[in-house]
Amino acid sequence: MSHSSARAFLGKIIDEEGFRKHMVTELSKKRNELIKESGFDFSEEELEIAKADFPPGALGHVAGWFCNVVNEQPPKGGHCCSSGLWH
């Protein structure tokens, strides 16, 4: 794996809405499979409601990333934090 390949992937995620939506859909499906395999059963809406029960940042970076599947076009720079905001 190379740095240039990773940059090309991120560029495609940013620039191509169809590709981004496909990746988000597949990521969401896989995440839901992993959650169910772990013995949990809830909808996206129920997850969002449960996330609101915790203070900002409480989920931490990894858990926050796993719980946030972003379908909107990200800005050209920065990153998405655990609260789902782009910086």
Image: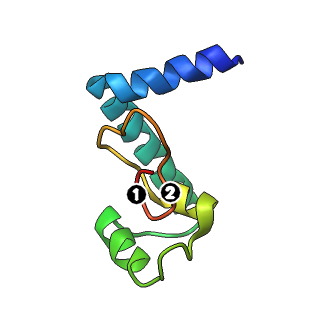
Q: Residue at x 41, y 58 (%)?
A: 84
Residue 58 vertical position relative to residue 16 in the rendered view, above or below: below
Q: Quadrant of the N terminus?
A: top right
Q: Residues within 10 Å of mark 1 (few under 14, many from 20)?
A: few
Q: In the figure, is residue 45 to the left or right of 31? A: left
Q: Position of residue 80 (x, y in %)?
A: 47, 50
Q: Of helix, strand and loop, which one carries label 1?
A: loop
Q: Which residue is mark 1?
A: 85
Q: Amino acid at mark 1?
A: Leu
Give amino acid for label 2: Cys
> In the depicted view, which residue is nearer to us: 14 or 30?
14
Mark 2 and mark 1 residues within 8 Å of each other at the beta carbon? yes
Residue placed under numbered mark 2 in the picture? 81
Give the CA distance from mark 2 to mark 1.
6 Å
> Residue lying farthest right?
1
Q: Please provide percent x and percent y for residue 54.
A: 47, 82
x and y, in percent, of residue 34 in the image: 56, 54
* Residue drawn 34% across the image and 23% down it: 15
Quadrant of residue 18 in the image? top left
